[in-house]
Image (cartoon, helix red, strand yellow):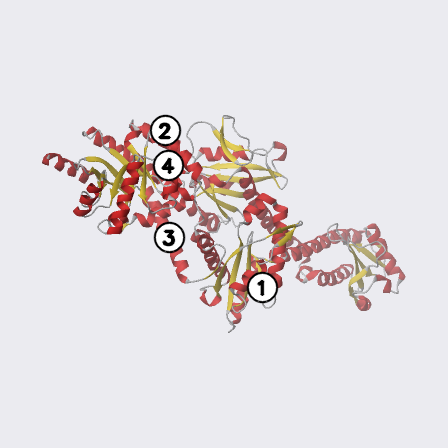
């Protein structure tokens, strides 16, 4: 994968926690973990073929601690190194995995290897790409077991820290659960029957029976507890009992008539120790997290020292069992509950949907996903605490609106789900909780939402598929219908899959050099001499079918592939111009399209300088064609960048003029040399209205001192009319079609021979 960053030896780092800058500190960044803390680190694997990315990540996170631990970095530069490190280095928490390394899909191909072959289920995978405008493709999220998908350019120091913190926290939780399971397995070998009891009360009942069996006495006893938050004067409670004590369950200890027994239990609880007596034993089974707990077992004979030692060991074992049972109860609740807002989480929602599907109800149900618009900006500007309060308030509103039999859940950062009868899940009802502003910290905050609805009858699968399909609807709504509620239809999924397949094939075609350039001549209308050429990219797939640039160029722009593709086009177009100049066409120019994504990329100026230098071509012979869509972005920044490009010597042309936004408003501000009349106007130039538009554009160009070119000329009459209007240059099929290099050279030779 070619680097999008400067190739000098400087490292790039983060300034003021936000801006990516270059620094001259070439000292090797530390691993992030001191020797004193080597055993208490989070191991992070950076899998990327760009050394700069490794250096930047090390530098940005140097001396960083997450959840009280330092970071220890491991570096891999290709798939084989990544797999080897994952095989040999234990307890790697997070892998920052580049999508494109030695192959177009190297990162994606590693995901099933990590999950299925290496069995690393807890490892958190953050996919990264170096291209700008890279949006997470829907089917990548659907088909690959990844945890996050980020642009490298988006990972400022704060965002990188936030992503790693989220991943590490998730990894820690999974490892905690796994380690708890392992601990329980060891305890099961000693007290398997105790752990078969469901809940602490049932467990306590089993404890009495097992201790009595160990002592060889009848199971006569009680277990009494004192919670950590219980006041000292509050009475103690009996939670389990056996034998003659059974009637005391769930009653206060003061209800016990046997003063010796109650005295022993109080002494054990007050002093947190075992108390041995000739009439019985009170064993302390409490812990700091769970609270105080003591078990009294009646005995008619003194406890021997050997038995006391055995009981000490057994009590420690039982206390650990009780802690883990309590812990598992909390984990079970945590696994199915969102702790921030107190709603069911994604796992719980999946189970609810699965149960509904299994029951086969005739009542039509739907699933809606609700996303708060611009929540990330609110969170960034007003702070995380404010954002958390806002989420809790939104959760309360949605839950109050959608009560039983509906299920309200939180499935993402600012995304809520509502599952219930389709008659309940309607556009108006989803919008209603957000009609009135929220009062947070004394301030009023009005929220808008975007939502997607999927009827369960349209789902082919179970709960997870329902949530994925609802996510597709939500994503499309956010990109095309923000602030609205959108209904599901199968075409959404089909189109998303087709786009992903086409993008995958385009990446492969680009990596395998299956794309090629064609060149269309531009002619001066006054004498039809060749003034230059326009370089156009073409793609013929493995089936021999030509894919229209109108299909694949937008995908390349959305995915960020246009950055590398654009540099490749420019480099090859300039190389062709150098060849043509060697053949005698010294005054010919070469036009190349420059997308908004390329213009806004941080490396654009360096890239232009780099490519020009490779062929020693005067940049004044290179014409970069831009479109009016630059007005849709940061127009001031784009205009400044265009000024810098013109100052480098390049010519700038406004392509497809008249079809974009704010054409006349910004035209005078743009440092352009040429106007290109869009083919749609040329095709209508034989009509009165069409001719007037073309004449207006020609006169506008002349007034501004610009060269005017008409493209898409396909008929002789169009050329005649354009010449009468005073248009300077033309290009189109009537004069010459776009041609590969060899055909172009043959065409030029034939024209030269004809004089």
Give the CA distance from mark 4 to mark 3: 34 Å
Circle 4 sits on which residue? 670
Badge 2 or badge 4: first in the primary sequence: 2
Give the CA distance from mark 1 to mark 4: 55 Å
Give the CA distance from mark 2 to mark 1: 61 Å
Q: Are marks 4 and 3 in contact (CB under 8 Å)?
A: no
Q: How many residues crowd mark 3 within 10 Å: few (<14), some (14–19), many (20+)?
A: some
Name the one closer to the observer, 515 or 38: 515
Q: How many residues crowd mark 1 within 10 Å: few (<14), some (14–19), many (20+)?
A: many
| Residue 92 in sight | no
The C terminus is located in which quarter?
A: top left
State whether residue 280 is above or below residue 604.
below
Q: How many residues crowd mark 4 within 10 Å: few (<14), some (14–19), many (20+)?
A: some
State whether residue 584 is above or below residue 519.
above
Badge 2 or badge 1: first in the primary sequence: 1
Secondary element at tag 1: strand
Circle 2 sits on which residue? 647
Badge 4 or badge 3: first in the primary sequence: 3
Query: For the point 51% across and 74% down, which residue is it?
Result: 362
Query: For the point 51% across and 37% down, which residue is it?
Result: 74
Circle 1 sits on which residue? 407
């Amino acid at each position: 994968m070619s680097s999008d960053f400067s190739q000098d030896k400087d490292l790039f780092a983060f300034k003021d926690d936000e801006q990516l800058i270059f620094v001259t500190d070439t000292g090797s960044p530390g691993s992030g973990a001191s020797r004193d803390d080597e055993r208490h680190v989070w191991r992070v694997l950076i899998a990327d073929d760009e050394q700069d990315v490794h250096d930047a990540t090390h530098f940005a996170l140097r001396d960083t601690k997450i959840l009280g631990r330092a970071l220890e970095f491991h570096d891999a530069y290709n798939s084989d190194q990544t797999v080897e490190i994952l095989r040999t280095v234990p307890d790697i928490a997070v892998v920052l995995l580049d999508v494109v390394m030695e192959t177009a899909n190297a990162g994606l191909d590693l995901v099933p290897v990590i999950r299925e072959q290496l069995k690393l289920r807890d490892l958190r995978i953050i996919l990264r790409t170096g291209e700008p405008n890279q949006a997470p493709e829907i089917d990548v999220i659907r088909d690959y077991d990844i945890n996050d998908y980020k642009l490298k350019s988006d990972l400022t120091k704060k965002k990188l820290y936030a992503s790693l913190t989220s991943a590490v926290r998730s990894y820690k939780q999974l490892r905690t659960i796994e380690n708890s399971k392992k601990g329980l397995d060891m305890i099961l070998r000693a007290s398997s029957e105790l752990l078969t009891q469901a809940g602490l009360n049932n467990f306590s009942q089993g404890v009495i029976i097992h201790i009595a069996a160990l002592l060889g006495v009848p199971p006569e006893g009680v277990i009494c507890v004192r919670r950590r938050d219980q006041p000292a004067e509050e009475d103690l409670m009996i939670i389990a009992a056996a034998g003659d004590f059974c009637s005391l369950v769930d009653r206060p200890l003061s209800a016990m008539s046997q003063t010796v027994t109650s005295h022993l239990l109080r002494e054990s609880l007050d002093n947190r120790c075992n108390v041995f007596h000739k009439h019985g034993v009170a064993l302390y089974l409490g812990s700091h997290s769970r609270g105080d707990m003591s078990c009294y077992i009646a005995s008619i004979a003194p406890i021997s020292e050997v038995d006391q030692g055995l009981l000490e060991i057994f009590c420690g074992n039982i206390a650990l069992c009780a802690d883990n049972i309590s812990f598992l109860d909390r984990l079970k609740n945590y696994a199915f509950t969102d702790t921030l807002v107190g709603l069911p989480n994604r796992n719980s929602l999946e189970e609810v949907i699965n149960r509904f599907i299994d029951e086969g109800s005739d009542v039509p149900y739907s699933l809606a996903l609700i996303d708060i618009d611009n929540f990330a900006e609110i969170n960034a500007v007003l702070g995380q605490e404010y954002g958390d309060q806002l989420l809790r308030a939104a959760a309360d509103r949605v839950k109050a609106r959608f009560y039983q039999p509906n299920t309200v859940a939180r499935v993402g950062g600012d995304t809520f789900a509502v599952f219930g009868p389709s008659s309940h899940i309607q556009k108006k009802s989803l919008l209603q909780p957000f009609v009135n502003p929220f009062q947070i910290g004394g301030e009023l905050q009005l929220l808008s939402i975007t939502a997607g609805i999927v009827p369960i009858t349209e789902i082919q699968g179970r709960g997870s598929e329902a949530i994925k399909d609802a996510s597709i609807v939500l994503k499309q709504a956010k990109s095309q219908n923000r602030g609205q509620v959108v209904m599901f239809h199968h075409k959404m999924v089909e189109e998303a899959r087709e786009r992903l397949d086409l993008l995958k094939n385009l990446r492969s075609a680009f990596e395998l050099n299956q794309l090629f350039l064609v060149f269309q001549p531009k002619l001066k209308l006054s004498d039809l001499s060749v003034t230059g050429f326009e370089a156009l990219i073409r793609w013929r797939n493995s089936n021999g079918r030509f894919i229209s640039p109108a299909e694949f160029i937008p995908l390349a722009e959305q995915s960020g592939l246009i950055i590398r593709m654009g540099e490749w086009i420019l480099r090859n177009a300039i190389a062709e111009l150098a060849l043509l100049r060697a053949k005698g066409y010294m005054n010919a120019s070469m036009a190349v399209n420059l997308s908004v994504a390329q213009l806004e990329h941080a490396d654009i100026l360096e890239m232009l300088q780099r490519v020009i230098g490779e062929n020693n071509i005067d940049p004044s012979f290179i014409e970069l064609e831009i479109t009016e869509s630059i007005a849709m972005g940061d127009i001031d920044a784009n205009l400044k960048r265009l000024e810098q490009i013109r100052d480098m010597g390049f010519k700038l042309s406004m392509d497809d003029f008249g079809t974009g936004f704010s054409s006349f408003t910004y035209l005078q501000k743009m440092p352009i040399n040429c106007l290109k009349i869009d083919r749609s106007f040329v095709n209508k130039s034989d009509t009165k209205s069409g001719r007037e538009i073309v004449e207006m554009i020609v006169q506008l160009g002349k007034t501004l001192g610009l060269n005017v070119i008409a493209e898409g000329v396909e008929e002789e009459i169009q050329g005649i009319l354009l010449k009468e209007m005073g248009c300077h240059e033309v290009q189109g099929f009537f004069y010459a079609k776009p041609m590969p290099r060899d055909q172009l050279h043959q065409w030029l030779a034939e024209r030269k021979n004809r004089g």
